[in-house]
Image: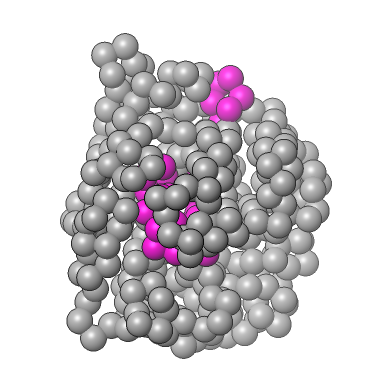
Amino acid sequence: MVTDSTGHQTPVPTGQSISLPDGFDIQGHRGARGLKPENTLPAFETALDLGVTTLELDLHYTADGVVVVWHDPDLPGSKCVADENGPEIGSRISNLPFEQLQRFQCDRNPDSSDFPEQNNEPTALAGDNYQVVSLEQLFAFVDDYTNNPEKTADQRQNAAHVQFNIETKRKADDPGAIGDDFDGVNPGSFERAIVELIEKHGLLQRVIMQSFDHRSLWAVRQLNPDIRLAALTSRGRPDPALYAQQGATIWSPRYRDLTSSLLETAHEAGLLVNPWTVNDPAEMQRLIELGVDGLITDRPDLLLSGPSNQ
């Protein structure tokens, strides 16, 4: 069994003990979506408790210019509930000021069949704070975690070095999803605000920027070429060599799309390869044996549960 920060125990499939290569990157998808409601402080705390090497998360932009941690362009009733003074469920993040977002509690599980182990019990540090948080609040929370005596020395040390893989949720076919001044080439206020926060908190060496809208990545590169960039892809015809030529250092394909030939091409181009989103232990093992450099997963506990990975 694996025990998270609430004392909740998760069974590990019998016979599964995954051996990880040195330096393997275990990315907790949206924190640890398989165990806690996604992109919330309890989800990130649970991922840190388990010992992930990277916190993976999504970013949107409020009407008053706050970078927030959330996946969807709106706040659906399947994930959130608003207090009596709050805006309507389904409101777009880009149309709301940050203060209004704080009126939502996003502690619901919309995918209980996929994530039966997810619970919304309080965690030791975050408690029952399932609000939408800003990127700056997340940075501060991780910093607080590293100095909290309730956590073990190993947990605090890992948190002090954990990476942040942050995804800009731009959509070429839906400019209103972010709603800023982006022209498709030059950085918009969204990218500028993100890079400013990274630099302010001294996290250049610990942050990866990823996006399916690669225009956002190349805009970030204009602002600070030292930030690592990860090109996300889904279906289509991926071109890892082109991504490397344009400035990416990581390629993150949908795991079902990855072949040994594409992996070889990416490695020859100098890219690390971190597929998404892998939750089945057998698939995890297959991809590790194929030679990937990391995995993005809703269930980091399955990767970190083996005796050789403690």
Q: Nearer the viewer, residue 143 or 88?
A: 143
Q: Quadrant of the C terminus?
A: bottom left
Q: Identify whether 273 is placed above or below 124.
A: below
Name which residue lies at 67% across and 38% down: 197
Name which quarter of the figure residue 14 lies in: bottom left
Q: Nearer the viewer, residue 98 or 305?
A: 305
Query: By what rule are the colours in the image chosen?
Result: one colour
Is residue 203 visible in the rendered image? The answer is: yes
Name which residue lies at 34% across and 26% down: 104
Q: Quadrant of the N terminus?
A: bottom left
Name which residue lies at 22% across and 77% down: 13
Name which quarter of the figure residue 2 lies in: bottom left
Q: Nearer the viewer, residue 218 or 104?
A: 104
Q: Which residues are magenta?
A: 37-66
- Residue 173 image position (x, y, % from top left): 55, 40
Going by the picture, which residue comes out furthest to the front? 149
The verdict on residue 60 being magenta is yes
Image-based side of 174 in relation to 88, left or right? right
- Residue 47 image position (x, y, % from top left): 41, 57
- Residue 275 image position (x, y, % from top left): 49, 69
Q: Identify whether 68 is placed above or below 169.
A: above
Q: Identify whether 85 is placed above or below 144.
A: above
Image-based side of 112 in relation to 4, left or right? left
Q: How many numbered marks are there?
A: 0
Name which residue lies at 68% across and 49% down: 203
- Residue 139 image position (x, y, % from top left): 57, 42
Is residue 162 visible in the rendered image? The answer is: no
The verdict on residue 110 being magenta is no
Q: Identify whether 127 is placed above or below 244.
A: above
